[in-house]
Amino acid sequence: MTEARPIRLGLLQYPVGRPTSIADFARGLDRWLEEGRASADLLVLPEYAAVELGAALSRGEATETAELAAMVKAAPDILAAMRNAAKRHRVWFQPGTLPMRTADGRVINRAPLITPEGLIAFQDKRAMTRFEAERWGVSQGTDPNVFDTPWGRIGISICYDIEFPKHARVQVMAGAWLILTPSCTDSLAGFNRVQFSARARALENQCYVAITPTIGEAPWSTALDVNRGRAGVFGPMDRGFPVDGILAEGQMDAPGWIFCTLDPSLIETVRRDGAVLNHRDWPRAAFAPPKTAHFA
C-alpha cells in the first residue's frame, strides 16, 4: 500500500449538456479536464454524467429504457473516450459512473478510476435507488473495493451507497482515508440525503468524504431532466478541522470546478488525539437484538 500524502482534489459540478455523439462528449471532457488539471491531482465527475449522451444515442426515442439501452451498448466506446481523456491530459480521473453490462447479462452502475497511463479499475454501485431498480432495471453491483494511488488508499461510495454506513466503513477499515462520492440527485431532498450522509460518514470514520453532483435542467433527457446539488468536501468535526466539518463547498446548482487540498496527516492526528475517537470506538461486534425494557 502506498504511503498516504496530501492530494489536491478537483470536483466538477457538472452541467448536463446535449452532446450529439461520443466524439462530441469527448470534446467536452477535454475542455473540462484542460480547465481542471492545472489545479488538481485527481479530477472527479458526478454519477451518470455520461448519461447526457443517452438522448443522442437512442436516436430520438425518448424513453428511459431506450436511453439506457443505448448507453449500455455504447459503454465500451464511452469508457474509451474517458480513458483517452485521462491519458491526453496526464491526470488521475474519476469520470463519474457508466451503466455497463456484466458477463451474465445484468446492467450495473460502475465508477471507473483511471490513471494518467490509462489503466482502469472499477467500483460498482451496491445499493440501488428505486428509479434504478424499478424503472431502469439496474442491478446491484459487487462489494466495496479500495484503490491504491500515489496519495495512499482511497474508496468510492457512489451516491446512494454513502447513505449506508457499512459501505464506507469497510473501505476505511481497509485503509481508505478519502471516500469519493459521485452523485446524481433530482431534488434538494435527494441532494441533502447524500450530503448529510457524507458528513456523517466523515464524522464516524474520521476520514474525508467528497461529493459532486450533476446540475441543471435537461428536458431532452428522460434520466437527467432535473439535477440539483453542489460539490462538497467534508471531514470530522474535531480538532484541526472546521467546527462544521465543511472543508470546501460549491455554489448551489452552479457549474464549475471546486478544489481542495486534503492532508492525511490530519486524519492520523485526529484519530489518535481527537476530542472523541469515533474511528476507534465504532462497535466492534454486532449488537444483540434489542429486548423490551420494562418499567418498574
Image (cartoon, grey):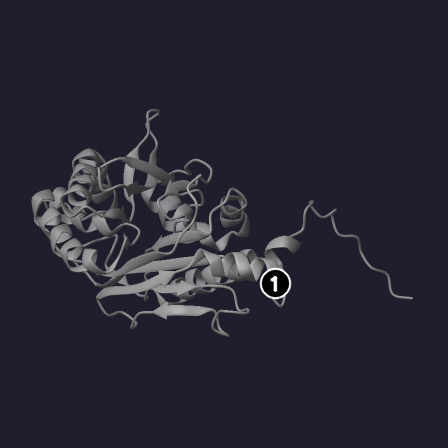
Farthest top residue?
104
Q: Residue at (44%, 39%) from the top-left corner?
A: 1
Residue 65 screen position, x and y as percent: 25, 42
205 is higher (above) or lower (below) than 111:
below
- Which quarter of the figure has residue 252? bottom left
Which residue is more in the foreground, 182 or 132? 182
Q: From the image, which quarter does the C terminus lie in?
A: bottom right
Residue 124 screen position, x and y as percent: 38, 40
Farthest right residue?
296
> Does the rendering let one see residue 15?
no
Q: Residue at (33%, 41%) from the top-left corner?
A: 109
Left or right, 27 with respect to 202, comes to left
Residue 282 screen position, x and y as percent: 64, 53
Which residue is more in the foreground, 108 or 205? 205
> Does the rendering let one see residue 132?
yes
Looking at the rendered structure, the secondary structure element under dot 1 is helix
Kindly identify the amino acid type of the residue bearing the numbered disc 1. Answer: Asp
Left or right, 43 with respect to 278, comes to left
195 is higher (above) or lower (below) than 171:
below
Left or right, 146 with respect to 222, comes to right
Say few, some or many: other residues with alpha carbon within 10 Å of mark 1 (under 14 / 14 to 19 / 20 or more): few
Q: Which residue is mark 1?
A: 273
Which residue is more in the foreground, 246 or 148? 148
Residue 100 screen position, x and y as percent: 28, 36
268 is higher (above) or lower (below) than 287:
below
Give the total of numbered labels.
1
Which residue is more in the foreground, 15 or 66? 15
282 is higher (above) or lower (below) than 196:
above
